[in-house]
Amino acid sequence: MAQKRPILITGGAGFIGSACAKALMDKKERVVLVDNFNDYYDPKLKNDRIKKLLKGYRFTLYRADIRDKKKIEKIFAKEKPKKVIHLAAMAGVRFSIEHPDLYADVNIMGSINILEECVKNKVENLVFASSSSVYGNTTNIPFSESAPVDTPLSPYAATKKADELLAHVYSHLHKLPIVAMRFFTVYGPWGRPDMALFKFADRIVKGEKIDVYNHGKMKRNFTYIDDIVSGVLTVLDRKTTYDVVNIGGDREETLLHFIEVIEKSFDKKAKKRMMAMQPGDVPATVADISKLRKMGWEPKTRIEEGVKNFVNWYREYYKV
């Protein structure tokens, strides 16, 4: 009997990639992971997601860089994926300001390689990671997918906007069904160490000061990892030509309240260093999630529960 075609995930050892892989394998899907295990943050965490989070699951893993055109060609030719979740990217606003060439190379050139192979191998559906960063300093809150996104504030945001434009081109020229998902501040167990929750946890545990930007006058939609995964799987099953979809929590949370929830979970007060706004950052990212809701998706996890889950994982993982 012919094996069913797999779902290929780029950035498969990443925070969202590994969580999506687990959920898909729980649904008995065949999964192929591609990741280059770079050192933007500690590769040990990426390796542990594969060894511990995905322990006991059967999947294929390729250690490959999406910029390596020949290797990506070979992987697609061999695996013939049915659907693709493209999450591999250089992330982070601040780092992109210092390394714009790296972000353009990985996020744009790497994505073109994936788009090319999706067309060549007749992929049924491509879902890829865009970002709430594309909204820049948009003042119309909540951010709607129909809002203009022509004023990004960082190289990272500009590359994600470029990816959306390229995806539209490939969808138009080749009738490739593509959904760009604009993620809003994802958090949870196995998360990224460069994200606020992880940084705050580290410093609170060590008794060090946490940097609170814009003097705490920040608003965010924090989106728990399980809600992100259920949203990705929702759009992965939809047939569309080209679409852009916000995915975020349904509550507008202030940064200071978020810090209070972390303090409560650790039962320890944070020492705060109030700071000005950072270059490339925005005071508010709040999602209009009505489009994804109409597809039957709902965010289910409040930050009180999500942060507690993260803190429990953090204590266990780092033996705190």
Image: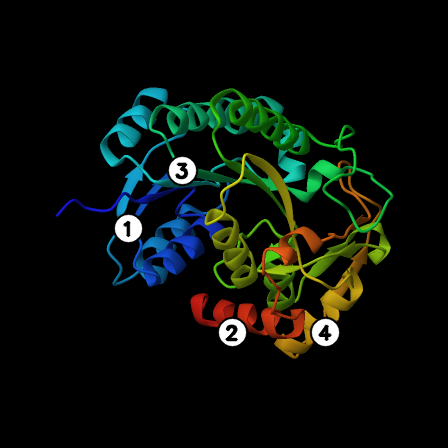
Looking at the rendered structure, the kind of residue marked 4 is: Lys
CA distance for labels 4 and 2: 17 Å
| For discs 3 and 1, the disc positioned in front in the rendered view | 3
Q: Earlier in the sequence, mark 4 or mark 2?
A: 4
Looking at the rendered structure, the kind of residue marked 2 is: Asn
Label drawn at residue 30: 1
| For discs 4 and 2, the disc positioned in front in the rendered view | 2
Question: Can residue 188 be spotted in the picture?
Answer: no
Task: Answer whether labels 4 and 1 touch (C-beta < 8 Å).
Answer: no
Which class describes the residues within 10 Å of circle 4: few (<14), some (14-19), or many (20+)? some
Looking at the rendered structure, the kind of residue marked 3 is: Glu
Label drawn at residue 64: none
Task: Answer whether labels 3 and 4 touch (C-beta < 8 Å).
Answer: no
Identify the residue position indicated by label 4 in the image: 269
Work out whether residue 102 or residue 291 is closer to the camera in this orientation and state it. 291
Position of 162 relative to 6 (above/below): above
Q: Position of residue 138 (x, y in %)?
A: 83, 40
CA distance for labels 3 and 1: 15 Å
Position of 221 relative to 64 (above/below): below
Q: Earlier in the sequence, mark 2 or mark 3?
A: 3
Label drawn at residue 124: 3
